[in-house]
């Protein structure tokens, strides 16, 4: 994917591929083809049954003829950055130095663009290997404001996506995320604090508030990612760019009275968007 001896610098290649530099310099342990196939299937099961934990996923895989233990499934799920979605005690506590912010969406009516933004990270299988995808959406319109890909679960590719969204669309009143380490890090919260954005974080039992971006992941995986075995990061970025352009500008949403996210976000119909383009 990255040609370290090529004419272009590693930094420039990362910019063209939409990858963060730290992920390129990091050398992860190789994942076996068998584990890659398992991870792809785990991702499919998680999307179909997000309430399945490692025990149920292991049992389902056993029913499918795959001899795999629960501990190995737990390890792979951790590597993929996924866990079962259900009301449960806080079992994933960020580091003490990270900043936990209060939950601000309780009883709030979200009724305009740039009132609330949300972000999340998902796993992207490829023909060989995998990537992580971070997306930022406007909750009211469902518009995808920015996305970035990385081969590691570091914070910097999330910040790159955040800064791009802020530069292109201004700032939201509230930014809501879960309490993942990327979103509780000072690097992330400092950007939002500096921009004057109120930070909201889902607390115990509040996973449902990320449901809109979870629906986005379901759409992008069934309508794009699962249909193509991306060869590398370049192809993944190109195809995802095209998909999100389609999603924002042309994909009709029933909940929006069959308007597109761009039409809702900008408050105009498709004909007016075409005239403004």
Image (spheres, rainbow, N blue to C red):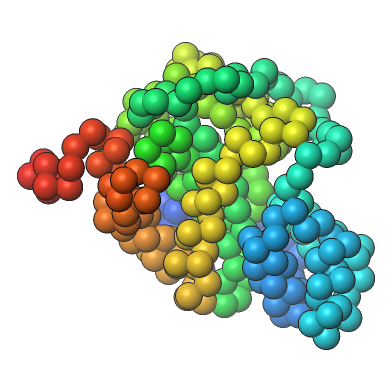
Q: Please, is residue 208 above or below residue 121 in the view?
A: above
Query: For the point 36% across and 51% down, which residue is it?
Result: 253
Where residue 26 sits, quadrant-wise, is bottom right
Query: For the point 81% across and 56% down, which residue is it?
Result: 53
Q: Relative to the observer, which residue lies in front, 259 or 80?
A: 259
Query: For the point 29% across and 38% down, which residue is it?
Result: 264
Q: Relative to the observer, which residue lies in front, 157 or 225?
A: 225
Q: In the rendering, at what x and y percent does residue 275 appear? A: 7, 44
Q: Relative to the observer, which residue lies in front, 4 or 184?
A: 184
Quadrant location, the C terminus: top left
- Let me know if residue 43 appears in the view: no
Q: Please, is residue 241 above or below residue 196 in the view?
A: below
Where residue 164 sits, quadrant-wise, is top left
Q: Is residue 43 left or right of residue 2?
A: right
Q: Relative to the observer, which residue lies in front, 5 or 29?
A: 29
> Furthest-bottom residue in view?
65
Where residue 34 sits, quadrant-wise, is bottom right
> Furthest-left residue in view?
275
- Let me know if residue 227 appears in the view: yes
Q: Please, is residue 115 above or below residue 164 in the view?
A: above
Query: For the point 45% across and 67% down, which residue is it?
Result: 224
Q: In the rendering, at what x and y percent does residue 71 appear? A: 92, 63
Q: Is residue 204 left or right of residue 187?
A: right
Q: Is residue 248 left or right of residue 103?
A: left
Q: Please, is residue 216 above or below residue 65 in the view?
A: above
Q: Is residue 65 left or right of residue 235?
A: right
Q: In the rendering, at what x and y percent does residue 175 appear? A: 52, 26
């Amino acid at each position: 994917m990255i040609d370290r001896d090529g004419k272009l610098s590693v930094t420039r290649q990362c910019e063209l591929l939409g990858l963060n530099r730290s992920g390129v310099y990091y050398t992860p342990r190789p994942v076996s083809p068998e584990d890659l196939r398992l991870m792809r299937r785990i991702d499919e099961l998680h999307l179909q049954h997000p309430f399945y934990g490692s025990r149920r996923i292991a049992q389902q895989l056993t029913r499918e003829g795959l001899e795999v233990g629960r501990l190995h499934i737990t390890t792979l799920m951790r590597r993929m950055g996924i866990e079962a979605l259900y009301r449960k005690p806080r079992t994933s506590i960020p580091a003490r130095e990270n900043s936990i912010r209060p939950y601000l969406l309780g009883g709030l009516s979200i009724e305009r663009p740039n009132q609330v933004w949300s972000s999340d990270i998902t796993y992207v299988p490829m023909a060989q290997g995998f990537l992580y995808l971070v997306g930022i959406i406007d909750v009211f319109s469902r518009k995808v404001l920015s996305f970035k890909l990385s081969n590691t679960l570091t914070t910097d590719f999330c910040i790159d996506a955040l800064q791009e969204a802020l530069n292109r669309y201004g700032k939201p009143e509230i930014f809501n995320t879960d309490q993942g380490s990327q979103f509780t890090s000072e690097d992330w919260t400092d950007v939002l604090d500096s921009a004057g954005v109120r930070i909201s974080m889902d607390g115990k039992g509040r996973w449902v508030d990320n449901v809109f971006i979870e629906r986005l992941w379901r759409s992008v995986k069934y309508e794009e990612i699962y249909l193509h075995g991306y060869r590398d990061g370049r192809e993944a970025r190109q195809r995802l760019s095209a998909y999100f352009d389609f999603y924002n500008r042309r994909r009709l949403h029933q909940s929006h009275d069959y308007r597109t996210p761009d039409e809702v976000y900008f408050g105009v119909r498709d004909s007016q968007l075409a005239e403004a383009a």
